[in-house]
Amino acid sequence: MRKSRSVPMAAAVAALAWQLVQASGAAAQDFGDARLGEAYAATVCAACHAVRAGETVSPRQRVATFDTIANTPGMTGTALAAWLQTSHREMPNLIIALADRDNLIAYIVSLKAR
Ligand code: HEC
């Protein structure tokens, strides 16, 4: 009796675990929402960086534009994630929430020239 009930249960747990694995895999690859990232960049990052596609000069001297950052050879979402996890030399207190970070990465990666 007990045994016949626990088998479907185990199958359901396994299926749920599989879905979680799939979901986290997709999140790691796709990062966040580029539109939210753009809005965040426009409010937080734009003080120093040119954040829009096609902008060639940042408000602050010697600060890379997001266009340049996105099109740096070898720049990937993973590389950006690593960079944004370490502190900005000029702004050590910049703390970006994980969700915001993922949105920013999605946005910056979207600036890559196609
Ligand atoms: C107070 C000015 C300032 C703000 C605001 C700012 N940055 Fe920066 N950022 C800099 C400076 C200066 C550098 C280059 C010097 C350094 O490495 O710290 C830089 C470098 C970077 C780099 C590395 C560029 C490269 O070529 O390796 C990335 C990526 C970056 N910023 C992303 C962001 C994001 C995303 C935001 C908004 C959340 C942001 N920055 C906000 C000043 C700023």
Image (spheres, helix red, strand yellow):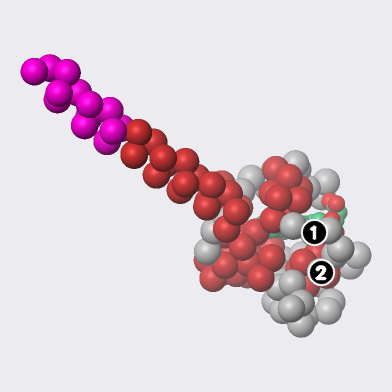
Name the amino acid type tagged 1: Met
In the figure, 8 relative to 33: above or below? above
> Does the CB distance between marks 1 and 2 fall below 8 Å?
yes
Q: Per the image, is 10 magenta? A: yes
- Please tell me whether mark 2 sits on a helix, a strand or a loop: loop
Measured from the top left, where is residue 43 in percent x and y?
Answer: 60, 66
**Magenta stretch: dominant SS?**
helix
Residue at point 52%, 52% (across, down): 26
Measured from the top left, where is residue 99 in percent x and y?
Answer: 53, 51
Query: Which of the pair 25/8 is nearer the observer?
Result: 8
Ligand 1 position by quadrant: bottom right
Q: State how far apart marks 1 and 2 are (Cα).
A: 7 Å
Mark linked to residue 75? 1
The verdict on label 2 being within 8 Å of ligand 1 is: no
On the question of residue 54 being in view, the answer is yes
On the question of residue 44 being in view, the answer is no
Q: Per the image, is 92 magenta? A: no
In the figure, 17 relative to 1: above or below? below
Query: Which of the pair 6/23 is nearer the observer?
Result: 6
Outermost residue on the bottom side: it is 54
Outermost residue on the top side: it is 2
Q: Residues within 10 Å of mark 1 (few under 14, many from 20)?
A: some
Name the amino acid type tagged 2: Asn
Mark linked to residue 71? 2
